[in-house]
Amino acid sequence: MKIVMAKPGLDGHDRGAKVIARALRDGGHEVVYTGLRRTPEEISRIVMDEDADALGLSTLSGAHDVLIPRICALLRDSGMGHVMVFLGGIIPKRDHEKMFSEGVRAIFGPGSRTEEILMFLEDASSRIGSNMPIGVLNDDGWRWN
Amino acid sequence: MALELTGNKELLGSALRGSRRDLSRLLSLIEKGEDVAIPENTSTKKSMILGITGPPGVGKSTLVGRIISYWKKEGKRVAVLAIDPSSPRTGGALLGDRVRMDSADSGDHVFVRSLSTRGNPGGISASLMSMVKLLESCGWENIIIETVGSGQSEIKIVAFADKIILVDGPDRGDIIQAEKAGIIELADLIVVNKSDTPGALKVAETIKSALSFSNENDSPQVLLVSAERNTGVDEMMELIRYSKSPIWRDRIKIRERLLSLWDYRLLSSSQLNQVIEDIETGSISLEDGLDILSR
Ligand code: B12
Ligand SMILES: Nc1nc2c(ncn2[C@@H]2O[C@H](COP(=O)(O)OP(=O)(O)OP(=O)(O)O)[C@@H](O)[C@H]2O)c(=O)[nH]1
Ligand SMILES: [Mg+2]
């Protein structure tokens, strides 16, 4: 899959995002890394220009609450509802349901194993391949776990 | 060869009318090896195509970021194709060029696309030609191609550009080693980046003296810049704007373009596998095989 890996907002913790970007590359994916401090508008534009299949977002600062819904809405509004969004970093359990309801398909917290993330992507990609779209626009309820 | 789907036509129409989303989708189709034929009657203004190449990590992307800003100030619409190698083993790639282009995501007048070398049966060069044509038709006036220049195939990539800047860094001088590969011959300008660090001046001097041994008196100029501090960039852009390619350099470029089109024809032939098998079993000769493929 072609995946954009982005760090939204002012959060400067980029270790996790970089580790995951490399792991996904080693798993055979094409990963575009955006670097730090991208606005939701920039991220949605990058996803468009790159024509990515999926968007991975990494936040550890606690700002996911406002940033993630904004990004998902921008994707939906700019004709990119087919893009699958997944999330990692520090996302408290109590926020998971809200994130899922925004269209996020998976959340990977600290200590997540790359094998599992790769398994998720494989599953996601076979769903997309067999015409079961799981973009931010599709609310079929499917999620990882 | 042309696989013209009706869907493509619609996408193309919409891209030509300015849809960024559909332009981007068409680029993906070209990347997968599809032919996106632009109608003859499309009125197209010739774009300025700038190739940026050089060894890994010398600061090409940072420099591209500066060039974007420079052209943006002139009111130009700038598109970038940034090419990174993919792993031949897994097919995966980490495309990190845009991290360094902080001007890249700044609005409607800049379009940046990362490309890996995988995928296209004919190699990236041939699809690159179509991508550049498409961007041109969609009104992207200035187009930058960034690629790591460390092998023969990369030379072909930059040969699609009107002007070529070869970038080197301190403590490297790699491009002198690379001279054999013919990259220096193609460059309109040689830039030694990271002039803010100690080794840069020495590399620039080494390159200059190496060039002075060649008997061409129109060998490219050597310029020191610092992409990070944004020094020397304006001068670089002036030099490249007014540089004139000698005829022999234009000829080398055309030669490289021909070669890559040739490669593309051969590699994308539906008979390729059959021909390889037949040569293997000895039922045809190499020359016969070539005849079949180039028909
Ligand atoms: C290292 C660290 C730093 C380093 C960051 C270095 C860097 N360049 O990344 C430094 C020292 C700079 C730093 C600074 C700060 N930090 Co800090 N930092 C940490 C720490 C200790 C570890 C983070 C880390 O790198 N982990 C290792 C990586 C590999 O793990 P990871 O990022 O979690 O990623 C894994 C998963 O989450 C997942 N993943 C992550 N992203 C993604 C994305 C996708 C798509 C997927 C699939 C998976 C995925 O996969 C990874 C592998 O399993 C955490 C505490 C903790 N235990 O998490 C605090 C922590 C994140 N920091 C915190 C804070 C408060 C700060 C500061 C504000 C401190 C201050 N007062 O100055 C600053 C803010 C800096 C800034 N501008 O944002 C808080 C955040 C609190 C919150 N969210 O409410 C934490 C949680 C500490 C705490 N318990 O209070 N920090
Ligand atoms: N000191 C100094 N560092 C620079 C300068 N320009 C770029 N760098 C640094 O050099 C490193 C590589 O920069 P990039 O722009 O990614 O180089 P690149 O040639 O595009 O790299 P690849 O695409 O991986 O081949 C980064 O850490 C930059 O910050 C400069 O002018 N001075
Ligand atoms: Mg680069």
Image (tube, coloured by chain):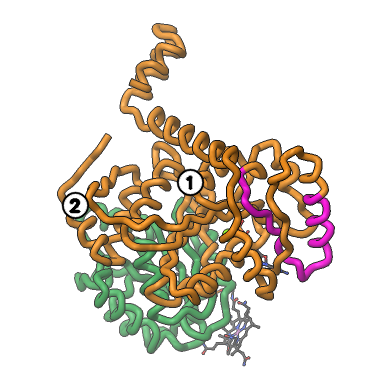
Chain colours: A green, B orange
Q: Nearer the viewer, residue B32 or B166?
A: B166
Depicted A144 relative to depicted B25: above or below = below
Find out if the beta carbon at label 1 lies less than 8 Å from the nearest ligand 3 atom: no
For disc 1, the marked residue is B160
Percent position of residue B255, x then y: 51, 34
Q: Chain of mark 2?
A: B
Ligand 2's quadrant is bottom right
In the picture provided, is B182 more to the left or to the right than B282? right
Few, some or many C-alpha atoms within 10 Å of disc 1 (few <14, some 14-19, many ≥20)?
Answer: many
At mark 1, the secondary structure is: loop
Q: CA distance from mark 1 to mark 2?
A: 25 Å
Q: Does B207 lie within the magenta span?
A: yes
Task: Find the magenta span and give its range.
Answer: B186-208
Q: Name the residue at the top extreme.
A: B283
Marks 1 and 2 close (CB-CB < 8 Å)? no
- The number of numbered badges drawn on the structure is 2
Q: Quadrant of residue B276?
A: top left
Which residue corresponds to the image point at 40% horizontal and 72% vertical from the top-left?
B109
Residue designated by label 2: B9
